[in-house]
Image: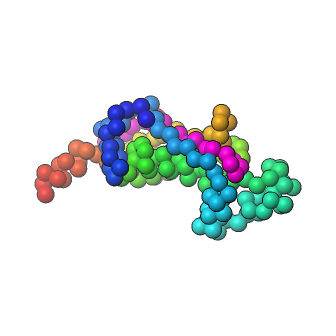
Amino acid sequence: MDSPRLHTDLNGFFIEDLYVGMTAIFAKTITEADIVLFSGVTGDMNPVHVNEEFAADTMFKGRIAHGMLTASLISTVLGMKMPGPGCIYLSQDLKFLAPVRPGDTVTAKAVILEIIPEKKRIVCKTTASVGEKLVCDGQAKMMVRSRVEEEAKAAKA
């Protein structure tokens, strides 16, 4: 993260703490268990994800992780790092560019492109990469809490 640590584990950044260009990342190695559990949670048992024999005959020549499993790491960046706890995910545009395989380490990244303080909104470029290869590209819109508003509410209480 590019800025001083202004939030705690339970309270993310306020809109007043953010700036254009501010960046956060999260990295995770995708395991067999991740793919199996994601399949179970979502009900997406597409054999390209869960059946090696089937997947070997596809254009991928083997099993791949769900695109949305990869994209969910972007949610981790936004929800836990920047803007962090307390923000609300409003929208996400995604393009899946390359497969992620079991054992790949995915690095999700968010960069603030725009801040709209009067609406308490930010727009972020979102990406996921395996090494230098971009596997997912997109843009997210988030609602972020205002310190000024929360302090005003607290003063009235």
| Residue 97: image location, x then y, percent | 69, 42
**Which segment is the magenta one?**
100-120
Q: Picture coordinates of residue 95 (x, y %)?
A: 64, 45
In the depicted view, which residue is nearer to us: 127 or 105? 105
Residue in the foreground of this view, choosing between 52 and 73: 52
Name the outermost residue toward the left: 156
Is 68 left, or right, of 139 in this rendering? right
Q: Is residue 51 visible?
A: yes
Location of residue 50 by image quarter: bottom right
* Image spot of residue 152 (x, y percent): 17, 49
Q: Is residue 116 magenta?
A: yes
Q: Is residue 89 placed above or below 135 in the rendered structure?
A: below
- The x and y percentages for residue 30 are 63, 51
Q: Nearer the viewer, residue 112 or 129?
A: 129
Q: Does 84 lie within the magenta span?
A: no
In this rendering, position of residue 102 left or right of residue 68:
right
Q: Residue at image x 70%, y 51%?
A: 102
Using the image as rendered, state which of residue 14 and residue 53 is in the foreground: 53
